Amino acid sequence: MTSSNAFSALAPYGWDEAWAEQFAPHDSEGLLPGRVVRVDRGQCDVVTAGGVVRADTAFVTPHDPLRVVCTGDWVAVEPGGNPRYVRTCLPRRTAFVRSTSSKRSEGQILAANVDHAIVAVSLAAELDLGRIERFLALAWESGAQPVVVLTKADLVPDATALSYLVQDVETIAPGVPVLTVSALYGEGLDVLVALAAGGTSVLLGQSGAGKSTLANALVGQDVMDVQAIRDMDGKGRHTTTTRNLLALPGGGVLIDTPGLRGVGLWDAETGVGQVFSEIEELAQRCRFHDCAHESEPGCAVLAAVDAGELPQRRLESYRKLMRENQWIVAKTDARVRAELRRDWKRKGAEGKAAMELKRGRWR
Ligand code: GDP
Ligand code: ZN
């Protein structure tokens, strides 16, 4: 298999020049590039140019739980062998990490190299802006570009009402495209398909938000139903039997793992700043640089609330999210976090700027 063959076979899974360059030293060692489509207790399925292979992760199972191979990782696998081993994992561009609530308080890696975090929000219920802010925070923290998709738009037939809802979300989501989709009538799906074509996406959102429906629309068949066919492993736990990473017919890749779907508390301090960028901007004009915006004299944030420029609700969400995050952050190892953040901060800023430039396309 020549490198150029590998290139065209893996391009649908997100392989690009930069990955190829990073992989070059492993290529000369005779290893194969591939992307992890599923991880499963010491083993993983890796899509390579020659198809999906099963590989053992013993070489890439460090003590640090955030360095454990996960769905979306690009890896170097041995060309054969029984077992065949994953030899190395390429440095991640982005990663979704969950802070566990266990006493050990170690993070858990859920998905790697995600470009778009698609936050599904149902229009069937009243918008919960605080919850959307929370999903956006975790998306920014991962390094991925968030996108809000308001689903079930057919339930809001009045165009003016719909545009107000979009505006409500836009005000709390600076730098985030907001789309409306009706899977029922196929409306708005073309825009989502085009967006997903530009990289690797994950679907986030509450249960019932319409994630499976969107996934089916993107994949073009009822893959998620297939995914729902579960078998019982030896411990009596349910495990999914299909892969968690799919190349989309319209281009791009979708990662959909049970862990990502059931996500609860998230570690998203940097993300909070991005979601509440207007508050962070105001805060720079506070008299005290460590102002808590509670009752301090010369507080520019409180002044903006008084002047009616900043909704009180918005300030309350900000405080709530900051409090939650401080609690989570305190539980998570500082070194690991610093390491993970290094590149993502830069990525997040770049991605946000690029997305703002492109925004017009999605409106
Ligand atoms: P998930 O839990 O986030 O995966 O949500 P599902 O995709 O399972 O959707 C939840 C419910 O919303 C299902 O009953 C869907 O049929 C319904 N639903 C999804 N998309 C639409 C839509 O565009 N319009 C309407 N009216 N219902 C939808
Ligand atoms: Zn202040």
Image (tube, rainbow, N blue to C red):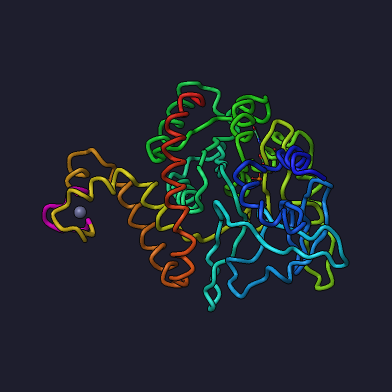
Q: Quadrant of the N terminus?
A: top right
Residue 156, position in %: x, y?
54, 28
State the residue lying farthest toward the bottom. 103
Q: Is residue 282 left or right of residue 186?
A: left
Residue 271, position in %: x, y?
42, 52
Please name the residue shown 52% across and 38% down the image: 148
The kind of secondary structure the magenta stretch mainly shows is loop
State the residue lying farthest toward the left. 297
Please name the residue shown 61% across and 51% down the image: 22
Residue 263, position in %: x, y?
58, 57
Q: Which residues are magenta?
A: 293-302
Question: Is residue 299 placed above or below 57 in the rendered structure?
Answer: above
Question: Is residue 52 placed above or below 83 in the rendered structure?
Answer: above
In the image shown, does 212 or 124 lie closer to the viewer? 212
Q: Is residue 43 left or right of residue 130?
A: right
Question: Is residue 153 placed above or below 35 in the rendered structure?
Answer: above
Q: Quadrant of ligand 1?
A: top right
State the residue lying farthest toward the front. 28
In the image shown, does 151 or 144 lie closer to the viewer? 144
Residue 161, position in %: x, y?
46, 26
> Which image quadrant is residue 91 in?
bottom right
Question: Is residue 213 placed above or below 144 in the rendered structure?
Answer: above
Residue 298 is a magenta residue: yes
